Amino acid sequence: QVQLVESGGGLVQTGGSLRLSCAVSGFFFNTVAMAWYRQAPGKQRELVADITSRFKTNYADSVKGRFTVSRDNAKKTVYLEMGNLKPEDTAVYYCSAPTLPYWGRGTQVTVSS
């Protein structure tokens, strides 16, 4: 059974930090690219960051320099370190294996001004 379980969301003030985690099971994690997406109220889901099986990373322009995506293949977990958070980062954040495609249920991140 495929599962992608996000955790680490919450309420944080502007300028604060959060670390999201996504624990994966049910498929061979090590060979699959992983990604974080987000969806704010009234907006389309957008790519935040992704990381290939070879650890190459890619970021949306809006988060470059503030967010870092990483993965731990031994733990079958992908992370999103978010720093200098802004109110416009408020959204539900989803973990994904976009090429398969598999999705988590999301975790809410709220940044207060």
Image (cartoon, rainbow, N blue to C red):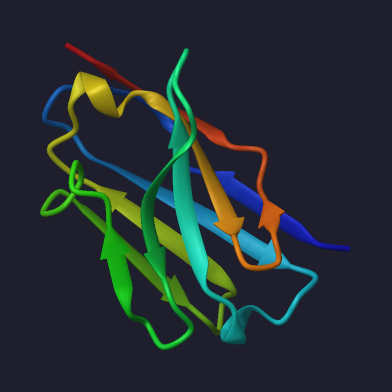
The number of numbered discs placed on residues in the rendered structure image is: 0
As displayed, is residue 49 above or below residue 27? above
Left or right: 30 with respect to 1? left
Q: Quadrant of residue 90?
A: top left
Q: Position of residue 106 (x, y in %)?
A: 59, 37
Q: Quadrant of residue 94?
A: top right
As displayed, is residue 28 above or below residue 58? below
Q: Position of residue 17 (x, y in %)?
A: 22, 39
Residue 23 at least partly seen: yes
Which part of the image, by quadrant, shows the C terminus?
Answer: top left
Residue 109 at least partly seen: no
User: In percent of the image, x 47 and y 77: which residue is there?
Assistant: 72
Left or right: 103 with respect to 11? right
Left or right: 36 with respect to 62? right
Farthest residue to the right: give it: 1
Q: Position of residue 88 (x, y in %)?
A: 24, 22
User: In percent of the image, x 55 and y 84: which residue is there?
Assistant: 74
Which part of the image, by quadrant, shows the N terminus?
Answer: bottom right
Q: Position of residue 70 (x, y in %)?
A: 36, 69
Left or right: 18 with respect to 99? left
Farthest residue to the front: give it: 44
User: In percent of the image, x 57 and y 47: which residue is there?
Assistant: 6
Q: Quadrant of residue 2?
A: bottom right
User: In percent of the image, x 33 and y 80: which residue is there?
Assistant: 56
In front of the other: 76 or 66: 66
